Image (cartoon, rainbow, N blue to C red):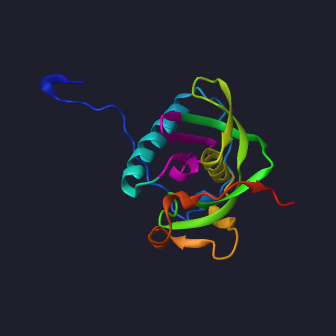
Amino acid sequence: MTGGKGQFWRAHMAVRRIRQLGDPILRVRCTPAEDPKSPAVRLLSDDLRDTLRIAKKKYNMGRALSAPQIGAPVRVILVETGKFRATMINPEITDVGSDDFQVWDDCFSFPNLLVRVTRAYRATLRYTDLKGKVNTMDLEGPMAELLQHELDHLDGILAIDQPSGLDPFAFRTEWEKNHKPDERYGPPRPREV
């Protein structure tokens, strides 16, 4: 887009600071977004998108970002993984399968640390999109783990709160020296009661 005298103008782009472990906003239980179609939610979605794209390049990881991670205590998540892109407003898990699996989880709020956690292998998610439409998704494996991680953020819960097994923490560089990328996800197993 050009302005007067040949100037070039860029569309709105706001990269926000990702809040790091220790920032109190990461421990807040977020409030629901009242109007998914509001300009405020649209701007928040744009800021999440722009921030996620820059963070992916900086850290060479990442598939999603939650609103509290950029300082907004509202129930909004942005997911960009492969060809799937969605702003999820007021998301909730409505069901989980009977199997769990272990995952070496990472997070932009502590990017140099991996934490082994146990997550449901299958889950059903319901959320509202930017047009106000309610969507339901059946999730499995890495996508199920990702959305459980992001929904935890909306409740002030971090992966470090849920370590699983012996020696559940590793610096990313050390983990990558000793493991292959496909070792991030363990096999599904029946949930222990």
Residue 38 visible in rendering: yes
Q: Check if residue 79 falls in the magenta segment.
A: yes
Q: Position of residue 32 (x, y in %)?
A: 68, 39
Q: Position of residue 119 (x, y in %)?
A: 70, 55
Residue ID at (64%, 29%): 35
Q: How many marks?
A: 0
53 relative to 18, above or below: above
Q: Position of 168 compared to 111: left or right?
A: right
Residue 173 location, quadrant: bottom left
Q: Residue 114 or 29: which is nearer the viewer?
A: 114
51 relative to 118, above or below: above
Tell me the quarter of the image containing the N terminus: top left
Query: What residue span does the magenta drawing correspond to?
Result: 62-85
Q: Check if residue 65 falls in the magenta segment.
A: yes
Q: Position of residue 33 (x, y in %)?
A: 65, 36
190 relative to 122, above or below: below
Q: Residue 21 or 104: which is nearer the viewer?
A: 104
Residue 106 visible in rendering: no
